[in-house]
Amino acid sequence: MKELLRLTPVRADRTVLEDLEHRGLIIRLAPSREEHRVNAPRGTGVGEAIYTSDTRFGGHALVKVSIDNETFSSFATHPDNEEFLLLGGRGERGLYLLVSYLSREALLEKLRTRTLQAEDFILLELIFNDPEASFFVMKAGVPHGECAFGEGRPATFYVTEAGSLPLDKIPLYNDYRLEIE
């Protein structure tokens, strides 16, 4: 018998994303943040890296992602960072991102011992086209996955990531059934 975890979506607004950043799970990308501004003398352009990908995984790639799945069947981790760029969204299904507060190892242990709880996760209802909440970095090793609900076309967004970044799936559904309230 699978254990039931009841999950309530939390709107992924600035406050929620700041909390995830404070916990070390993401890096918010917001042009209004002072730490994301570069002092460029008038008439010039200057760029500085926020971070550089690990070259073991290949060159950086911009990937278009469409989600038309009501389960988190690709719940997984990556060994390097990936950036979420939530542009568009009109006429599309609602996009949700399930993020575990646990490390991959701690999550796998809780799966093994059947002690996983809904409180081990946050379910984000993602917001498109918001300069404070629609652009962020999922840090390496953070367990996460996407799904879509509602009417419309498949939810589509962009990620940038290393060109050959592996998807290390986590068997979330072996012993658990997720229900969104």
Image: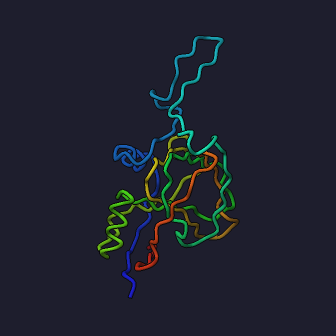
Applied colour scheme: rainbow
Residue 157 picture location, percent across and down: 64, 53
Residue at the (58%, 51%) spot, across then down? 165
Count of number-bearing discs:
0
Which residue is more in the foreground, 22 or 42?
A: 22
Which residue is more in the foreground, 57 or 20?
A: 57
Residue 13 picture location, percent across and down: 46, 50
- 131 above or below 49? below
Left or right, 103 with reference to 71: left
Residue at the (45%, 27%) spot, across then down? 34
Which residue is more in the foreground, 133 or 147?
A: 147
Task: Give the quarter of the image for residue 166.
Answer: bottom right
Residue at the (44%, 73%) spot, across then down? 181
Residue 147 picture location, percent across and down: 56, 66
Q: Give the farthest residue toward the front.
A: 56
Residue 148 picture location, percent across and down: 58, 67
Q: Give the farthest residue toward the bottom.
A: 1
The N terminus sits in image quarter: bottom left
Task: Give the quarter of the image for residue 162.
Answer: top right
